[in-house]
Image (cartoon, helix red, strand yellow):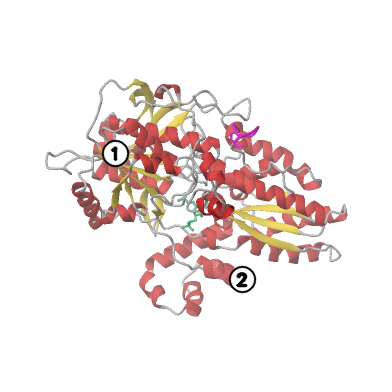
Amino acid sequence: MSTLVEQLLDTEAHRSIFETAVRQNPLPVCAAFGSSDQPQPVRFSNTSQVLGTKDADGVRAQFPQTVAASGNVVLSSAGASTARVTGKRVAVLFSGGPAAGGHNVVCGLKRVLGAGNTLFGVKAGPKGLLKGSLFEITDANVDFILNTGGFDFLGSDRTKIKSAEQFAQVRETCIKHNLDAIVVVGGDDSNTNAAVLAESLFSGVKADGSGVQVIGVPKTIDGDLQIPGLLSISFGFDTATRIYSEMVGNILQDTSSSLKYWHFVKLMGRSASHVALEVALQTKPAIALISEEIASKQESLASIIDRVARVIVERSHKGMNYGVLLAPEGLIEFIPEMNAMIAELNDVLAHHAAEFAALADDAKADFVGSRLSADNAALLASLPHYIVNMLLAERDSHGNLQVSLIPTEQLLIDMAKKRVKELDPAVPFAAHNHFLGYEGRCGAPTLFDAAYTFNLGLTAGSLILDGRTGYMATITGLSNGGTPQAIPLAGLLNIERRHGKDEFVIEKALVKMDSPAMKFFASRRDEWAAGDLFASPGPRQFWGPTTHQLPISVALNSGADSLMFRIG
Ligand code: FBP
């Protein structure tokens, strides 16, 4: 019998009682893969669905080999693989922000590749691919990471592979490790990277003239990688939104208990408001701002603040000097006048990068302001320094504004306070700010994310064994057993302006105003603002009644007739 101290020591290094138990949680697999104990690879055949954006001609010119090979046709599983493929050397990497379930993608890959093939992990994301930092993944590794959260087994980063030198480095890594395939687990930017890599590695990498296959796996808590009918959600969204919903539910419970505070909560999700919408549907707060609606109505910052302040005043007149406001992380970029200013700002920063970098911090705002049009310069000057500093901060390697660092929630509080005073000086307004982001990305995956990602790994591995390249793995029919499918990456590419120049990208899927989830939210929000109809969804469960629950927005948007998912 061990002592309590010995028992505690046993829980170090990812061996908490919970982590040990959750590793044993069985995972359902799509019927196509056979039994969950020994899932088997599937082969794929063409469906009748062809993808292509308005920029299809430009894409065909830039991606001639992958487009010719796939015809941009969607693939579907077509029964168990008949050929036993062995000897393949496959590398897997995580790219971008972590999302719950990444480890299970690795586990699914390892299982389906089997002992006859070798799986390598790339350390620290695309940067590790450039450096050739690879290690062989063992069965013991897989047993240990199964159903655990985070990306810590491999690590991740946001390096964009774009220069000729970087492509040469990737080739060197492929040659050095004699790779046959690379699996990129990432969001829209990373899957764009996967499309570019698939084209660049299509042929002529090895001595015999053959290439290296590249397969993408759809990850991002933001939920903005969605393709109607083919990809209802990226993995990690369910876990993150359930964690945020638990916290928001707890805060709501506190507001109606302590009766004196407003809480303004910024929720992660760089551009799209899927996370904020989902958390609103789960918790029913007094106010939830949806960036896409603000953009579609061309609502100005002053009008948003007026809308918020009026809810605060009206609730106060009913004796409710409290409430919760949810704001999406990317809000600022969707407010029309801010969006126009940021676009001009981005061009100025891109064109004067060296000069700007050499400036002292306190000279930067004036430097940029003097190069903006009069309206945009005035808007920039009107913003508090904590917003300006972040608008001028370095973009990530994909050219994105680092919205997680912009304290939008504080801006909303400061402006709402002023407007409430104007509307009714007698209304008390005490507010706390929160940013829920990093605490939701690495939790242990919900059963949905755990099963979904394991099956995505099985699909990605099957595509490699089937000789495919330039596809993103997906599972369709999530309430109906699940079907492994593959989406041609080049068929998703569009041209977008980044860093002041045109680039190929996978367009982010934003919240649509006519989507069932948005319509349902819009039909209920006035009631939520007027009273206390909030719900506290509680912690996500691994065993229990909500274990098999789909995200509410996914269930509504995919026309499901219940909240339950069924894989297998
Ligand atoms: P991905 O798109 O790479 O999945 O990352 C999403 C995200 O979590 C955003 O919601 C957030 O704005 C961003 O990452 C934060 O990035 P970082 O981890 O670099 O601070």
Residue 305: name its quadrant.
bottom right
x and y, in percent, of residue 164 in the image: 23, 55
x and y, in percent, of residue 187 in the image: 43, 46
Distance from mark 1 CB to nearest ligand 1 atom below 8 Å: no
Name the amino acid, label 2.
Answer: Pro
Q: Which residues are magenta?
A: 543-551
Which residue is identified by label 1?
Answer: 60
Which residue is identified by label 2?
Answer: 384
Camera-side residue of 452 and 541 = 541
Would residue 17 be seen by someone viewing this image from the given angle?
yes
Distance between the alpha carbons at the discs numbered 2 and 1: 46 Å
x and y, in percent, of residue 555 in the image: 59, 32
**Residue in view at x 71 percent, y 50 percent:** 250
**Residue in view at x 77 percent, y 54 percent:** 255
Find residue 489 and name its label: none
Residue 521 counted in the magenta span: no
**Which comes sooner in the sequence, label 2 or label 1?**
1
x and y, in percent, of residue 381 in the image: 58, 72
Camera-side residue of 61 and 393 = 393
